[in-house]
Image (cartoon, rainbow, N blue to C red):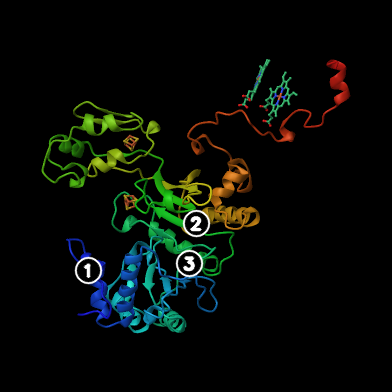
Amino acid sequence: MALKHKTPMLEELEKGPWPSFVADIRRMAARKPMCEDLLGLLELSYEQKEGHWKHGGIVGVFGYGGGVIGRYCDRPDLFPNVAHFHTLRVNQPASKFYSTEQLRKICDMWEEKGSGLTNMHGSTGDMVLLGTTTDQLEPVFYHLTHELGMDLGGSGSNLRTPSCCIGKARCEWSCLDTQEITYDLTMTYQDELHRPMFPYKFKFKTSGCPNDCVAAIARADCSIIGTWRDKIRIDQEAVRAYAAGELVPNGGSHGTAKRALDIQKEVVDLCPTGCMEWDGKTLKIWDEDCTRCMHCINVMPRALRPGQDTGATILFGAKAPILEGAQLSSVVIPFMKMEPPYDEFKELIEKVWDWWMENGKNRERLGELIQRFGMKAFLEAIEVQPDPRMIKTPRYNPYIFYDPADVPGGWEHDPKAFRERHHA
Ligand code: HEM
Ligand code: HEM
Ligand code: SF4
Ligand code: SF4
């Protein structure tokens, strides 16, 4: 179909083997003028090498303080159909399992009330409905809630949409019911999600094991990562089958051809703590020295499995660079059992929120507040004892603060007594 606008640069991106977003949007443009103008606007941005959306945009639905990202084009004279181009975040089902029936209903609604374009999914996890006008926001919201059983996701200084790895639904390594946790947290904290009440944004992500397929450690203020505290389960027969070349290592990730696995070189020598031994017949693991890195299990999924006394390590503080530099989350709870209704976890989270809501500066992420006040203050506020597993190394500098209550005599100083012992 011929577009209303000329798009020679975008057309270059219809070439090549990867699915072309340009070809897809063009297909939709046959039915939706919004898509035609979006391509025209994008071509202009390609030409001029600058964005063509106005700054900001505050729109939404009544009752909620977030969930919609308002956007207005700065050339409505040329592209009137994208003068408004707001995005709705729709809370996705945990791990993004859908029925085709549900997806069809969403598509029909969005083709009628929006641009027909989506992002499946936003980086935080939401289903993103890309592009509609302000007058359609309440009708879309009504349809989502009354017809589709779906709600908006989060945006703004609030709890954002939690997300998780595929977990027990399809992964034999999952130490957590990641979907149940994600759904429970989402439902428990609906108020915090829909009505911004925090100094800044806050995210939960849950991975069933340390492979961390949802990248919780890097992308969530609170990272919940599955682990175990008993022994790795070993099927010695299966270990020997890998050594004999009967089973393909790494589930075939490095080639599906059968080959003998060199257990010494590819597993034992790569164990980060050196806690494994292989005598050619039997694999031994000294579990007390295992840091549960997943390497051996990843290489021999048919032979090794996580233990059965499972729970989560809870880490806090991950964030992107702005303002004070990027952070990965830091271990705060080395191990916590995670079973419904997750009371222990929720008590912890509420203490974290109380402290951050009270002390956090405007637009200060939790990770930055921990840096500013110190891990010691954070641990005191959430009533957690310091633990060697919280640090990679002890501090190297000697600038150590003491509580005067812990120092004999406190900070009271008698200069006269000092001068009697040390004459000026
Ligand atoms: C057991 C004895 C001593 C201890 C524990 C000690 C400890 C320290 C410490 C912790 C610093 C700060 C380091 C820094 O800011 O990075 C420092 C700096 C310094 N000390 Fe000592 N010190 C001792 C003896 C002395 C003596 C006897 C002198 C001179 C006669 C001295 C001269 C200095 C100087 C000039 C600095 C500043 C260095 C700089 O800022 O680059 N110190 N000392
Ligand atoms: C007119 C004389 C002096 C002036 C103007 C002076 C000035 C300074 C200044 C500006 C600093 C840096 C403070 C800071 O980093 O916040 C300093 C640090 C220091 N000065 Fe002096 N100073 C003088 C004499 C001395 C003498 C006579 C000694 C030792 C016998 C001395 C020992 C030190 C030491 C050890 C430090 C490091 C303190 C630390 O790292 O915390 N100063 N001085
Ligand atoms: S994080 Fe672990 S449990 Fe979750 S999908 Fe990845 S490998 Fe499986
Ligand atoms: S999980 Fe990692 S640390 Fe533990 S035995 Fe296997 S390779 Fe070693």
Q: Which mark is residue 90?
A: none
Check disc 1 and report the residue beneath it. Answer: 11
The answer to whether mark 1 and mark 2 are in CB contact below 8 A is no
Residue 43 in which image quadrant: bottom left
Which quarter of the frame holds ligand 1?
top right
Q: Are marks 2 and 3 in contact (CB under 8 Å)?
A: no
First along the sequence among labels 3 and 1: 1
392 or 246, which is in the foreground?
A: 392
Of helix, strand and loop, which one carries label 3? Answer: loop
Marks 1 and 2 sit apart, C-alpha to C-alpha, by 52 Å
Task: Determine which residue is flagged by label 3.
Answer: 154
Secondary element at tag 2: loop
Q: From this viewpoint, is residue 148 visible?
A: no
Density class for disc 1 (Cα within 10 Å; few <14, some 14-19, many ≥20) is some
- Quote the CA–CA distance across marks 3 and 1: 35 Å
Tell me the residue at 49%/52% (across/down): 222
Task: Please identify the quadrant where the C terminus is shown.
Answer: top right
In front here: 261 or 198?
198
The amino acid sitting under disc 2 is Tyr
Residue occupied by mark 2: 342
Please tell me which residue is depicted at 33% across the width and 64% down the height of the picture. Answer: 96
Residue 279: image quadrant is: top left
